[in-house]
Image (cartoon, coloured by chain):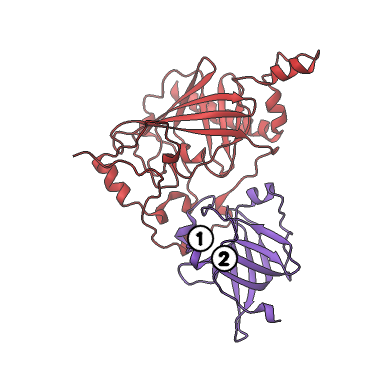
Chain colours: A purple, B red
Amino acid sequence: MSNMRVVFALIAGTLCLGAPISAHHNTATVYDVSKDKEVAFTGTVTKIEWANPHIHIYVDVKDANGRVKNFAIEGGTPNSLYRRGWRKDSVKPGDVVKVAGAAPSRNGMPRVHLGSITTIEGRQLFSGRD
Amino acid sequence: MPYESRGFGRGLFVALWSVAALGTAACAGQPDTNASATGAADTAAAAFDPRDFNGIWQGATQDLTANLLPGEEIVLTEYGAQRYRAVDHAKFPGNICLPYGPNRGMAATNPYMVVQTADTIAVLTEHIDYRVFYMNEKTHPEDILEYPEWMGHSIGRWEGDTLVVDTVAIRPESWLDRGGLEHSDKLHLIERFQKTSKDAFTWTVTVEDPVFFAKPFTYRLNVERLDFPRLIPDRCDDNEVDAEHMLPTPGAIHKVPPTMPRS
């Protein structure tokens, strides 16, 4: 699937992310939150961790050479996401999702901090960092 | 006496959690003893009780300097300046799920519930910390500074319809805000809670800490009732995986940089 390739790219400022917010730590301690470092990619969800203090969505991403790497996408706190209407099955294993506006890890690990996730059909599932 | 007082508070806290589990709707109606069934106007008037803080509230800020009252400034001592210059966000206690302390705990992105009786007011946070304001105690326990707690020891009183809370014995590991303001074990808070409507109040906090700050300063948050019927606990230890990935992140982040010592 062509859209499964990693498409790390600069993202235009169309996402209103605001200041990085997370419940228990400064996002910048783990992630490079510079606007010009934001990344985007498309992948297949392998696992959801709806757990405190922050949710994690794991996604298999294929690079240009066909190699697959599993990325951890860190999101907001379950309580704040729940209050905003999201549920732990809002995205499921097997879903193909587009991730945009994500902050890459500073230590080079395959981790990003969520900007937004959109299904392949165009339904936005999560947005914002909180 | 002081020991019995604290023990009573902890027992009461358990009971208050039970009350909290019944939902805020019941809490909100508790002090409303003057409500009339004769008309909507009477009911609406009775709904605003300036001394009723029951309910779930939220008033968040990452940066206390953005909430300083007009004319207020934060002036650091020599030691405070030394610590301020050395702030590293990777060392924030919350990174490893330690409690927030009262200032940060009541200004976090998670809301908190207030459960109120005539004798005791409890603040229950989603971060699973709590504060108890002892309304019948006139002084802090004599030895409380030898036994500091994450949320400190608080005694409350009414000045008119303003709830005034005096807090000491706060463990020095907590930060005052996410921006990087730290404090010592000499921290003394004077908080004023003033209802501005049925669903809002101001939380005005005066911070005294002669170890870190050359003079007291005061900040204020506008706090609003959360339109949601329950707390959802945020037990950080459940799945904390970020700490191992953290790298040094120096530099306090404040809209209004504190004033360095005048030497």
Whether residue A66 is situated above or below residue B28 in the rendered picture: below
Work out whether residue B191 or residue B200 is closer to the camera in this orientation and state it. Answer: B200
**Vertical relation: B46 (above or below) B218:** above
Q: Whole-percent x and y of residue A99?
A: 63, 67
Q: Is residue B169 left or right of residue B20?
A: left
Quadrant position of the C terminus of chain B in the picture: top left
**Given this view, does label 1 or label 2 mark the residue nearer the observer?**
2
Q: Secondary structure at mark 2?
A: loop
| SS state under label 1 | loop
Residue at x 62% of width, y 45% of height: B233
Task: Check the image and report above or below for A92 versus A69.
Answer: above
Amino acid type, label 1: Asp
Q: Quadrant of residue B8?
A: top right
- Quadrant, the N terminus of chain B: top left
Q: Amino acid at mark 2?
A: Ala
The span from disc 1 to disc 2 (Cα, nearest Å) is 27 Å
Looking at the rendered structure, whether the residues under marks 1 and 2 are on a common chain is answered as: no
Q: Residues within 10 Å of mark 2 (few under 14, many from 20)?
A: few
* Residue sitting at the far left: B263
Residue found 37% across the figure and 50% down from its top: B252
Residue B69 location, x and y as percent? 42, 31
Residue sitting at x 65%, y 40%: B231
Q: Residue furthest bottom?
A: A65
Q: Is residue A91 found left or right of B220 in the rendered image?
A: right
In the rendering, which numbered label is found on residue B242? 1
Chain letter of the residue beneath label 1 in the structure image: B
Q: Position of residue B42 (x, y in %)?
A: 74, 14
Count of numbered circles on the image: 2
Q: Subunit of mark 2?
A: A
Instruction: Kindly identify which numbered label has been placed on residue A12.
Output: 2
